[in-house]
Image (cartoon, helix red, strand yellow):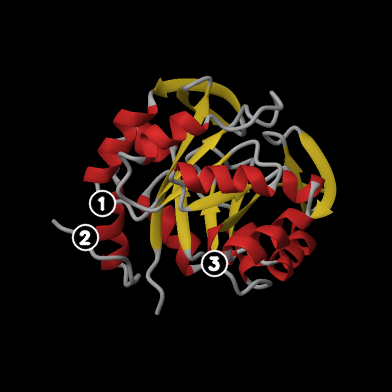
Amino acid sequence: MLKKRIIPTLLLKNECLVKGIAFNSWRRIGTILPAIKVYNARQVDELIVVDIMATEENREPDYEEIASFSAECFVPLTVGGGVKNIEMVKKLLRAGADKVAINSAIFKNPKLISQVKKTFGSQCIVASIDARKVNNNYECFFNRGKKATGIKVADCVKELERLGAGEILLTSIEKDGTFQGYDIELIKQVTDIVSIPVIASGGAGNYNHMYEAIAKGNASAVAASSIFHFTQQTPLEAKKYLSLMGICVRKYLD
């Protein structure tokens, strides 16, 4: 049985870490290097770092900064933000990323997924889907949730799997930063369709929310941000809770 993962998410805006609610009302919470060092010590399974302004500002990721903080990261690292082409993917991998998260390019340049698969393998592709419910259907959005695609999530994830995505990072825009729990209906809809791992994101407020995303939604991993930044809850305690609830998690030290 594959072990379930706990993955903190770090959002970069103008070189600062931020966190918002429903992709809005961004609040500054510090800088990235101290956060990475803390998570190294807290036995997280992986980290996700996304530059949330790169696409909007039409610029490439800061490869020098990524190389600097990736050198201090001792767990698998996914990096995203502004990724448009295979050359950018190559530069991110060279800078120290283990995986690359691709969001806007899914809709602007869908062939990129198959190109990356052919060149680097599916294992490094994290297809990032930001979803919102529209007229009782989940639809895909991009550019920090500002731009609608009109594409149903169900159709999108099937195509992403076909093209060669290694896993799906699935974020509920409406649940993001609310502490109200993951959108189980959304997660279940996607995990019922694809066979690749699905990382649930958006809404974690306590450890039981993580349990529900895994046990009810069948998520392979849970990503979270606010719960770790604004409460006393930790990834290590989340692992302990999930283990007590019968979820198979990666080993941890008390």
Label 3 belongs to which residue? 197
Question: Residue 6: where, in percent of width, then height?
Answer: 38, 55
Quarter of the image with the N terminus in it: bottom left
Q: Can you say whether 74 is above or below 249 in the image?
A: above
What's the amino acid at mark 1? Gln
Question: Can residue 221 be seen at all in this image of the molecule?
Answer: yes
* Most distant residue in the bottom direction: 1
Q: 10 Å neighbourhood of mark 3: few (<14), some, or many (≥20)?
A: many
Give the SS element for disc 1. loop
Q: Can you say whether 158 is above or below 36 in the image?
A: below
Numbered tag placed on residue 252 in the rendering: 2
What's the amino acid at mark 3? Pro
The image quadrant of residue 112 is: bottom right
Residue at image point 31% right, 68% down: 245
What's the amino acid at mark 2? Tyr
Question: Residue 172: where, in percent of width, then height?
Answer: 62, 47
Q: Toward the viewer: 154 or 166?
A: 166
Q: In the visual, does 98 lie left or right of 34? A: right
| Mark sitting earlier along the chain (3/1) | 1
Residues at circles 3 and 2 in contact by the CB criterion of under 8 Å = no
| Mark sitting earlier along the chain (3/2) | 3
Label 1 belongs to which residue? 43
Residues at circles 2 and 1 in contact by the CB criterion of under 8 Å = yes
